[in-house]
Amino acid sequence: MRNSFETTLKVNRLEICDLLLACLAARELANDGGEKWNRLHDKLKEQLKELDRQLDAITEDENR
């Protein structure tokens, strides 16, 4: 039950990038093809893209 709850982690953008790299390394070491790490990598990548969209919008607003 506990594993199905979502939470928010406070990390900066660089730490998200580090986690993406860690997922790739873990996938290479996994005995099962690394599907778990692929899913986590994809989830982190989407959240990073969303963060970048938000940051780009803030930058655009500041430049107006």
Image (cartoon, grey):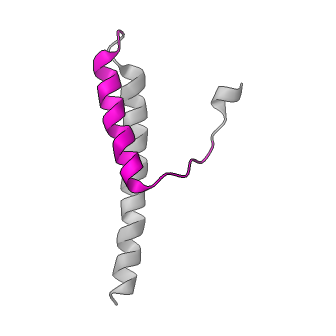
Residue lying at 36% horizontally and 31% vertically, measured from the top left: 23
Above or below, 39 relative to 20: above
Residue lying at 36% horizontally and 28% vertically, measured from the top left: 38
Secondary structure mostly seen in magenta is: helix
Task: Give the magenta-colored segment's residue range.
Answer: 7-31
Q: Residue furthest top?
A: 31
Tell which of 5 and 25 is nearer to you: 25
Residue lying at 64% horizontally and 27% vertically, measured from the top left: 3
Residue lying at 30% horizontally and 30% vertically, measured from the top left: 24
Q: Quadrant of the C terminus?
A: bottom left
Tell which of 11 and 45 is nearer to you: 11
- Residue 47 placed where, x, y %? 43, 50
Q: Does 20 appear in magenta?
A: yes
Name the quadrant containing residue 25: top left
- Residue 27 placed where, x, y %? 32, 22
Above or below, 43 relative to 14: above
- Residue 19 placed where, x, y %? 39, 39
Above or below, 22 relative to 62: above
Q: Quadrant of the N terminus?
A: top right
Q: Residue furthest right?
A: 1
Q: How many tags in the picture?
A: 0
Q: Does 27 appear in magenta?
A: yes
In the picture, measured across the screen, residue 47 lies left or right of residue 20, that is right
